Image (cartoon, grey):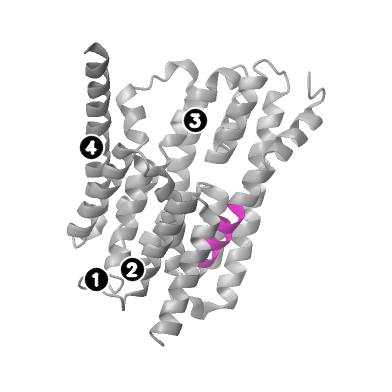
Amino acid sequence: MMYTTMIIGMALITVFIKAAIFMLGERAAFPIWLKEALAFVPVTVLTAIIVPMVLAPHGQDIELSWRNPQLVAAIAAVLVCAGTRRQLLTIMVGLAVFFAWQFGVLGR
Amino acid sequence: MPHPTSLSSFAAGARDTLPMLVGAAPFGVIFGALAAAGPLAPWQGQMMSLGVFAGSSQFIAVGLAAGQVGLLVIWMATFIVNLRHMLYAATLLPHVSHLPARWRFLLGFLLTDETFAVMNAYYLKHAHEPNGHWYFLGSGLSMYGNWQLWTLAGLLFGTAFPQLQTLGLDFAMVATFIAIVVPQLFRLPQLAAAVAAGVFAWFLRDLPYKLGLLAAIMAGVGVGLALSHWQALQRSARRKA
């Protein structure tokens, strides 16, 4: 039930954001600073979510070690993406390194 | 006139969106699989794709829901992450403002990063096409149907292999986000914004209700804005010198 409420709220917020300008027409004014700020939102949100997941995958202390498969695979994914800028390749290499490290190298 | 009937315009919109449909497919599957692995019921995963229809906010909500985060934080994150659609709408507005309200609402609901890219390119070439809204509808509806289909595929996959969760499926989300973020980091303000957000997120990670996440977003955006303004000042100073 809690998740249904969450989804309905998300849907209302998103529909409002997407449709408001088209419905209001020229009456909606958009400040320049907001335009500039929005350009930084995707990069900051996604980075802020993954950094703790990679550095402390068990939600406890920092795990800066080669025995942390999340960290090793994330570094591999960043390198592949910086080198090729290809999204799908990045995801596939990242996942391959993650599973290879987890089961092959660490034997878990 | 390249598309004489509403139907041919609709079909052309869907056809020109095809590369985007292929690109969105893996994200739909990963979203569905993550939703099935997390605390949501499978039908709630589909409901989110049907009602919210905004990929990155859906990923974030599923990730945060798994971490027992408060509703208000998830809604605020949804708001911040989806705010960019207002920019898209403002850009396309001159081409839809003549349409009836129900058309404007429908096309607004169907706005995504992909359809914006397709429509922006289309209106640059065909600014006064009378069937342009049908082209828009073709692009938007094909993205919508595509997203539902691949969400369902991911949900079925995730439900069939529930042990995926213990194998570390959440790393699929990390890899997906890296693939979105890294190509944007080749400009200094973006890189600094990401570093600031990461550092704040790390040190504030124990704040309740994931408030550290919101603080990290604000810090990152602030650093990015400050740096891009500083760069602009430097450029204009050099021009004067």
**Mark 3 to mark 4: distance in Å?**
22 Å
**Residue at mark 1: chain:** A
Of marks 4 and 1, the one in the foreground? 1
Disc 3 to disc 1: CB gap under 8 Å: no
The residue beneath circle 3 is: B88
The residue beneath circle 2 is: A71
Amino acid type at image mark 2: Leu
Residue B132 is tagged as: none
Of marks 4 and 2, the one in the foreground? 2
Amino acid type at image mark 1: Leu
Disc 2 to disc 1: CB gap under 8 Å: yes
Amino acid type at image mark 4: Gly
What is the magenta range? B24-33
**B17 or B241: nearer the viewer:** B241
Q: Residue furthest top?
A: B240
Above or below, B184 against B121 in this view is: below
**Mark 2 to mark 3: distance in Å?**
35 Å
